[in-house]
Structure formats: C-alpha cells, structure tokens
Image: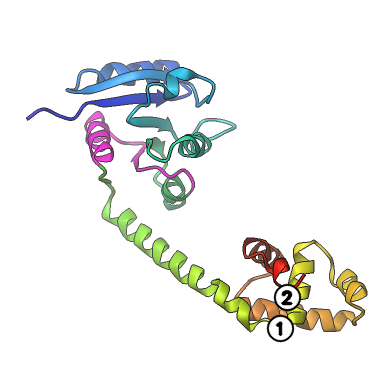
Amino acid sequence: MGHQEIRIVILHRNRLFRESLAFVLAKHEAIFVVWTAPGFDPTDGGLTSPRPDLFILDFGVPGRGGLDDAKQIQAISSECKVLMIDVPDIEADVLACIEVGGAAGYLLQDASVENLVSNVRAVVAGEALCTPRIASLAFSRISALARHTKELSPSNVTHLTRRELEIIALVEDGLSNKEIATRLHIEVPTVKNHVHNILEKLQLDGRRDAARYAKEHRLAMSWR
C-alpha cells in the first residue's frame, strides 16, 4: 500500500541546506517539496498556493525566529501543519515550539534524515512523535495551565466588591495608587489594601497581572 501524497514547503535561512533537504526528501515515496524560501512572506504566493500539507521550519532564524514564522502560518490557516527542525535539546525551546508556534512536531539538532521522514509522515497523519521525557513535560505543562485557568476563572470576579472592581479597572488604565486615591477621594493606604485584597482573591502576582486580567475579562464594563 502506497503512502499518502505530501506537499511540503521548506523555510530555512541557509539556501544550501534547504535545497539539499529538498533533494533528499524528493527521493522518498509520495513526498513532494513544492517550494523553498529563507522565511515566511505572506505575499509570496508560492508559500500558500496551492496550500501545502506541511511547512518545515528552521527554529533559529536570526533576528526573527522560526516561531514567528509558525505563528504567521497558523494565523493564515490553522489547518497548515508545522514541523520545526534544528530545535535545541532544551525543554523551554521544545515547549515553545508547541505553545507559541503551534508546531505539530519538532526535530532536535542531532536528528537524522530517517527521523525527519518519520516525523513528516506522522505529522501529516495527525500523529506526534516525541521522547518520553518531553511527553511527560508536556502533560505536566498542560496540567499546570489547566490549574492556572481554573484559578483565574471569571467566577472569582464574583468575590470582588464594587470598590475593588472600580480599583482594578483603574489599575488596568495604568493609574498609580496615588492617582487612584485622588480619583476616588480615598487615602493611598486604603487603595493599597484594596489592591492587596484583589491580588489575593484573584490569585495574581502583581499589578501587571491584575491589569491583564481586568482587560481579558472586561471588568471595567462590570461597573462603569
């Protein structure tokens, strides 16, 4: 039984590398490299028409990063799959491929051609190949994010008083404690106490987190 036809675009800063990679991949059944380029340019029709099945991206494009290319690709079409190559064997970088770039797969810097072909076929088939260490790390990260999301759920907002909603909205506007005190005609220590209570109730680490939380949950609209 033959393999599924796979149309690939290779994005890599080194022309010799991407052309060599295209030459090697072309020797494998049903794999077709339809375009190569040093980076993603949405105005370049060769990158998106006809739509490829897979983008192979260089992780370390100087000054920009393959993650930025991956985000642009995902913004155009979430159906386009991305395989990140030349990824350092660093947990933070591997997780960044998944979390930031939305990559469906990755290859470390010491990967072989056999590894590449296996990953290409797996990614296009909707599968993912990773080491047990990274799989465990990914599950731990997902669990932590789930807990964090629960802690910051909008239901926690119901525990804020009207005055606290006023203050967190002003924090979102960028006002200092002194400016908030002047605006609300209260004492600065009172503002500090309210801010402390807000951070405690919402399980936040500081004013910046509070401002972001207020913006994401549109808390200003709840009292204005």
Q: What residue do we see at 78% from left, 74% from top?
A: 167
Say if the magenta span includes residue 88: no
Disc 1 residue type (three-letter)? Thr
Picture coordinates of residue 64, whole percent (x, y): 57, 33
Mark 2 secondary-structure assignment: helix
Find disc 2 in the rendering and name its residue.
Answer: 165
Q: Label 1 belongs to which residue? A: 161
The amino acid at mark 2 is: Leu
Q: Which residues are magenta?
A: 100-125
Helix, strand, or loop for circle 1?
loop
Q: Residue at x 48, y 35 (%)?
A: 76
Q: CA distance from mark 1 to mark 2?
A: 6 Å
Q: Is residue 91 above or below residue 53?
A: below
- Depth check, front residue: 132 or 43: 43
Residue 117 horizontal side relative to residue 199, left or right = left
Most extreme residue toward the left is 1
Q: Quadrant of the C terminus?
A: bottom right
Q: Residues within 10 Å of mark 1 (few under 14, many from 20)?
A: few
Residues tagged 1 and 2 counted as in contact (Cβ below 8 A)? yes
- In this view, 173 is above or below 46: below
Q: Height in image: 71 above or below 41?
A: below
